[in-house]
Each structure stands twice: as structure tokens, then as C-alpha cells.
């Protein structure tokens, strides 16, 4: 498995950072609103299936059981019922991953194994004291180790937002480095910033840079449990950090919006923004994901509706 390597902490990219929120919001509107309106039914069907292929289908509830996870995995592998799917699509299109708690990773591994999809659908586990991140470091690292032993191939860590709010960038870097080391080359590391609890857009940018320096393969907006989750403006700020990191290092880092992406229209706005900023090369499961539990419902609805339009 190819993973992002740690680079030494560099405070220079964190200096003199300024984010003009109104300018960011205007840029988002220019990037997305007009282009969304121009999409034909055929293009929208393409975006719908693309959104499906980029989704980490998620269940993170207190009442998760083995049966819930088995149903999740089956739906990830077969998102459309056979009687309603286009023959070319049934069994061929699937989500990028399923995302569960560490204690449910073993259930996901066995379910995907039974479906013979372990080589096609990744198993992501939230870890490190999700969703708060306010646990002793040794217990957070143990969670990573346990999830990988159970079969996780991706670890969605959550940062301690108190470090962000207090500007303790060195400490944040060191903690993520240890998490990167715990993942080794056995699992990709997706770092959740918890943007709704980072205080400012400047902090979001700086936390993004620190997470990438520390070896994150993805930076992720939210846990989905905060009052504010994935929004297009905060996504653009994180994209600008990814662009700058790529300019400085030549390394491509992925982005995962999570929480609040519930419809195909939401997903299309994100994908168009990625295409217009980072480029189409980022629109692959290796570099872009949606963290979602409800998006697939609208994907199914739009898939049937658009397919029907195109058959007329």
C-alpha cells in the first residue's frame, strides 16, 4: 500500500495566513452555481454514478449491530436492486468503502469477504476517540492498532480540537505522526479536522497543512456529529491548502467532505468544485471521497429517474 510519508514540521506555511470569507463564498458560487445548471440528464447520470463510486457508506450509531453492518456492506456492493438496475450497472457499480466503528470492523470484513468484495470495497474505521478526540493518546493509538488487526484498510482519525484552538501546532503534528506510524503501510490515514469546532477558517487551513505534513493521506472535514459539518466554503479553504502542499512537496493529498452531503445535487457541487480547482485527476477514490449515510438514498432515486428520462 502506497501511503503519504511524514515530512519535518515546517512553521513557515502557517505564517501570515489570511482567509477572506466573503471572497471564498463568491468563489464557490462562481465555481459551482452556473456549471450545475448546465448539466444535461446524461451528464447528471454520469455525476450520479461517480458520486456513488466516491462514497464511504457509513453507519456510526450507538445501536449498530452485526446485522446492520451486513446490510450496509450488501448495499455498498449492490446499491441498486437487480430488477431496477441497468444490466451494465448491476454488480459493477459500488461504493468506495464502508465506514464503521472499530468494534464493527470484523463484521464488515466477514460480510465483504462473503460477498467477494474485499478487493473492491475498502473498510474504513473511525478511531482515536471519535468524535471528540479527547482521550489519552495511548488509548487512541490502541484503537488504530485494533481496527487494523480486525481488517480495516483505512483509518479515519479525529484530531483533538483543543490543540487547534490553542495554536499548539507542534503537538498536533506530533500526535498525527504517531497515528501515521500506528497505521504504517497497512492502512491509509484520513484525518478529520472537525471544522465546526476549529474556531476560524484560518485554523482550518493551518490544521490542514499540519495534518498533511504529518503523513495524512486524506484530510476530512467533519465527524458528522458537529453542529457545522461539510460546507463548500470550508471545502475550498481545504482545497487551497492541498494545492499549496502539492506546490511545496509534489504530493497529492485527498479530500473527504463528511456530514451534510445528502443529495446528488450536493455531491455534484462538490465534484464540480474539485474538477475546477484540483482537476479531474482528483475525482478518483484514491483522492476524493464523500462520507455519507443518507446520500445513497438520493443516488438511487436520481439514478432511476435519469435512466428513465434517457430511455425515452
Image (cartoon, rainbow, N blue to C red):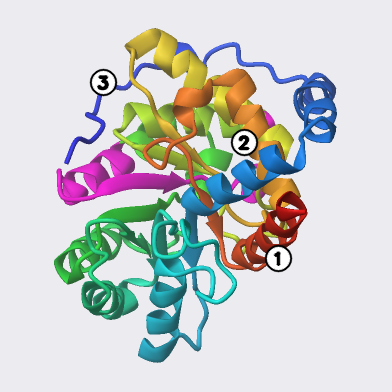
Q: Earlier in the sequence, mark 1 or mark 2?
A: 2
Q: Position of 233 compared to 50: left or right?
A: right
Residue located at (57% from left, 26% from top): 239
Q: Which image quadrant: the N terminus?
A: top left
Q: Position of 219 compared to 294: left or right?
A: left
Q: Position of residue 296 (x, y in %)?
A: 60, 64
Residue located at (37% from left, 82% from top): 70
Picture layout, residue 65 above or below residue 284: below
Q: Which label number is shown at residue 271?
A: 2
Residue closest to the eye, 60 or 81? 81
Query: How many C-alpha atoms fall within 10 Å of the one at disc 2: few (<14), some, or many (≥20)?
Result: many
Residue closest to the eye, 108 or 297? 297
Q: Which residue is mark 3?
A: 8
Q: Magenta residues, as a range?
A: 174-201
Q: Which residue is mark 1?
A: 301
Rounded to the nearest angstrom, the CA distance separating label 3 from label 1 is: 47 Å
Amino acid at each position: 500500500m502506497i501511503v503519504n510519508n511524514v515530512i519535518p514540521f515546517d512553521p513557515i506555511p502557517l505564517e501570515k495566513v489570511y482567509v477572506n470569507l466573503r471572497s471564498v463564498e463568491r468563489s464557490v458560487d462562481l465555481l459551482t452555481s452556473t456549471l450545475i445548471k448546465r448539466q444535461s440528464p446524461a451528464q447528471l447520470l454520469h455525476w450520479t454514478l461517480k458520486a456513488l463510486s466516491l462514497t464511504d457508506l457509513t453507519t456510526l450509531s450507538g445501536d449498530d449491530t452485526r446485522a446492520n453492518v451486513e446490510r450496509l456492506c450488501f448495499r455498498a456492493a449492490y446499491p441498486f436492486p437487480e430488477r431496477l438496475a441497468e444490466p451494465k450497472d448491476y454488480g459493477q457499480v459500488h461504493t468506495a468503502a464502508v465506514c464503521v466503528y472499530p468494534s464493527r470492523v470484523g463484521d464488515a470484513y466477514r460480510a465483504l469477504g462473503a460477498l467477494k468484495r474485499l478487493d473492491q470495497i475498502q473498510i474504513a474505521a473511525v478511531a482515536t476517540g471519535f468524535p471528540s478526540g479527547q482521550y489519552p493518546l495511548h488509548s487512541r493509538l490502541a484503537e488504530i492498532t485494533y481496527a487494523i488487526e480486525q481488517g480495516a484498510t483505512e483509518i479515519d482519525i479525529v484530531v483533538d480540537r483543543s490543540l487547534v484552538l490553542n495554536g499548539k501546532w507542534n503537538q498536533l503534528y506530533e500526535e498525527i505522526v504517531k497515528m501515521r506510524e500506528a497505521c504504517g503501510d497497512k492502512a491509509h490515514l484520513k484525518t478529520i479536522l472537525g471544522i465546526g469546532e476549529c474556531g476560524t477558517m484560518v485554523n482550518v487551513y493551518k490544521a490542514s497543512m499540519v495534518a498533511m505534513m504529518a503523513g495524512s493521506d486524506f484530510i476530512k472535514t467533519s465527524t458528522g456529529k458537529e453542529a457545522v459539518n461539510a460546507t463548500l466554503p470550508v471545502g475550498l479553504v481545504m482545497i487551497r491548502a492541498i494545492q499549496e502542499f502539492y506546490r511545496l512537496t509534489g504530493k497529492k493529498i485527498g479530500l473527504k467532505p463528511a456530514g451534510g452531503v445528502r443529495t446528488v445535487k450536493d455531491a455534484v457541487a462538490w465534484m464540480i468544485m474539485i474538477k475546477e480547482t484540483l482537476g479531474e485527476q482528483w475525482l478518483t477514490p484514491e483522492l476524493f471521497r464523500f462520507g455519507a449515510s443518507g446520500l445513497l438514498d438520493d443516488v438511487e432515486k436520481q439514478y432511476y429517474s435519469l435512466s428513465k428520462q434517457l430511455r425515452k
